[in-house]
Image (cartoon, rainbow, N blue to C red):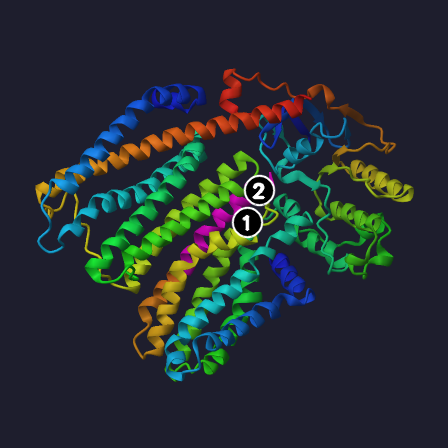
Amino acid sequence: MTLTVTDLTVARAGMPVLEGVSFVVAPGQALVLRGPNGIGKTTLLRTLAGLQAPVAGRVDGAGEAVAYAGHADGIKATLTVAENLTFWARIFGTQGIGTALAAYALEPLADRISGELSAGQKRRLGLARMLVTGRLVWVMDEPTVSLDAGAVEMFASAIRAHLGQGGSAVIATHVALGLEGAALDVSPFRAVLPAPGSDAFDEAFL
Amino acid sequence: MIALFLRDLKLAIRAGGGFGLGLAFFLIVTVLVPFSIGPQTDLLTRIAPGVLWLGALLACLLSLDRLLALDWEDGTLDLLATAPIPLEAVVTVKALSHWVVTGLPLVLAAPVLGVMLNLPLEGFVPLVLSLLLGTPALSVIGTFGAALTVGLKRGGLLLSLLVLPLYVPTLIFGAEAARRGAQGLEAGTPLLLVAGITAFAAGLLPLASAAVLRVNLR
Amino acid sequence: MSLWKYSNPSKFLTTSERILPWVWTLAAICLIGGLVWGFFFTPDDYRMGSTVKIFYLHVPAALMAINAWLMMLIASLIWLIRRHHVSALAARAAAPVGAAMTVIALVTGAIWGQPMWGTWWVWDPRLTSFLILFLFYLGYIALWSAIEDPDTAADLTSITCLVGSVFALLSRYAVNFWNQGLHQGASMSLDKEQNVANVFWFPAVTCIAGFVLLFVALVLYRTGTEIRARRMRALLARERAVA
């Protein structure tokens, strides 16, 4: 599934933040998004995931193919690691959490209550969730936050394996993952806001 | 969907308070009524159906603000919105698990509290039936309110303000059925009406709940 | 084209500013004229005496209480379908006016009810329905003011207005079922045979026209205020974004 983004404008709280964004991510490719904080990377990723509608432009090849990982991991503190993963596997209609546990070295923690995990371990669990979705296009927002060097390496190899199986990924990160893939700095796409008093400003109120 | 339902039940059991809290609240409210109006048995007998309905309604309301807020805070709703299950189904399942955790125990406990309020013998079956038919509507309507206020930091009071007026028809028909039953009158019509409201709410409100949830997620 | 061009905020502001003085004036003429006519130049009712005259406030306010909600419902639908900001803001602007009309209807009703029924308040279906309507207004207004992002607020309140309308209607039938009341049936209607004599009818219609005009004027005025507030917000947000 090729993800094609054409002339996309995205808005946060009614204000356009990025406009004219276009890129293509073919199967087997990863795209790393870069840009300063607050530029609109999260907004762009949420739009790709279908959580919000674009103001203008098109996103093709996403929809039901996308698995999204945001800042929060969607982990229930009172469930065990295995229960959390099994839940998401069943929601996405896939079988088996073994590979996901193995990819992030979570087997020893499988029966631990998630609330007792450290921040980094929780993050690993959140990333392992991507593996049980069975989705091809991974859309990930700052996935390496609170990971140590070893865990970042686990993540990089999980991404490489995913790409090797024909998957693709769009990742917003400031960390070098050692992936051969394009990087896209979104700063040039910062939206130009319509001037006050113009019809566009009037119509949109921003 | 079944996975979501089972997970919610599991969470309710693990978190401890789920089943117990609503019930305890129901008990307290019912016990406070004789304290506030006096212990005259005949008066209690007359108001018992209404008190029990009101208590059940308030107990339902109590747990609504946690219904979606927890899943919102930890990001689960974002992930569910990108999952292959439509959000309409998600909110329906949420309402169903809320009913099983909160509404159903209230229905089962109501006869016991009915005894304490001197509910006449012929009133028990209509009371339980009306609650059984009516409390699902309370959960479904409450889910709409919860979806509406999920993004607000202090949404609890607003949630009550929005949901309580929506509870009016259910309360009127439900309590009317219970009251008619207690007076030995025929309660079929209000029972049918309360069932109608439940069917109507369960059929249509999930669409609205999912729509407002989508708005809140963007 | 046509009517939709007023969905442009600037166009709306200039047009509403031009017609507002006229609407205010007409509203004042109709209200003062109708009320003076009704209070001083109509005979007392043979059963109700002079208390009947509160009718000239009570009935128009009650009508507008419902019509304001209907207007909000239509404006909400327009927002949801066509995404015109003015429409959403007009719905927001109408809500407090509608709530005030509901309060006027309830209070004048209570003042009228005291000599007629011997009580300020009865749990009559009509009275109860209006009370419930007032609660719906309160919830709607509270929801608007609780949400930060204006577009989100517009979406959520619009859907609430839709759902609320359905449940308000359900409540209306529910309270009818619950209690048959003291309140007389609708005493004025266009299709049924008139049970109000012409001498009462003409000042009443003038008062109703006055209330409608007053409502229109208030909503236009308040919508203008909402538009300006919204614009100010946008300008501030823009400044922050550019800085």
Work out which quarter of the rendered image holds the C terminus of chain B and state it.
top right
- Label annotation for residue C110: none
Residue depicted at 18% across the width and 47% down the height: C53
Chain under callout 1: B
Disc 2 is placed on an element classified as helix
Residue C162 magenta-highlighted: no
- Percent x, y of residue C110: 28, 55
- Percent x, y of residue B208: 48, 47
Residue type, numbered disc 1: Ala
Q: Is residue C221 left or right of residue A191?
A: left
Chain under callout 2: B
- Percent x, y of residue C43: 9, 45
Proximity of marks 2 and 1: CB atoms separated by less than 8 Å: yes
Taking the image as drawn, is residue A1 in sight?
A: no
Residue B207 magenta-highlighted: yes
Taking the image as drawn, is residue C222 in sight?
A: yes
Residue depicted at 18% across the width and 37% down the height: C36
The magenta segment is: B197-218
Please, is residue A85 above or below residue A193 in the view? below
Please, is residue A36 above or below residue B93 in the view? above
Work out which quarter of the rendered image holds the N terminus of chain B and state it.
bottom right
Please, is residue A81 above or below residue A154 in the view? below
Disc 1 is placed on an element classified as helix
| Frontmost residue, C46 versus B21 | C46
Mark 2, residue position: B216
* Residue B44, picture quadrant: bottom left
Rounded to the nearest whole Å, what is the CA distance between mark 2 and mark 1? 8 Å
| Frontmost residue, B68 versus B49 | B49
- Label annotation for residue B147: 1
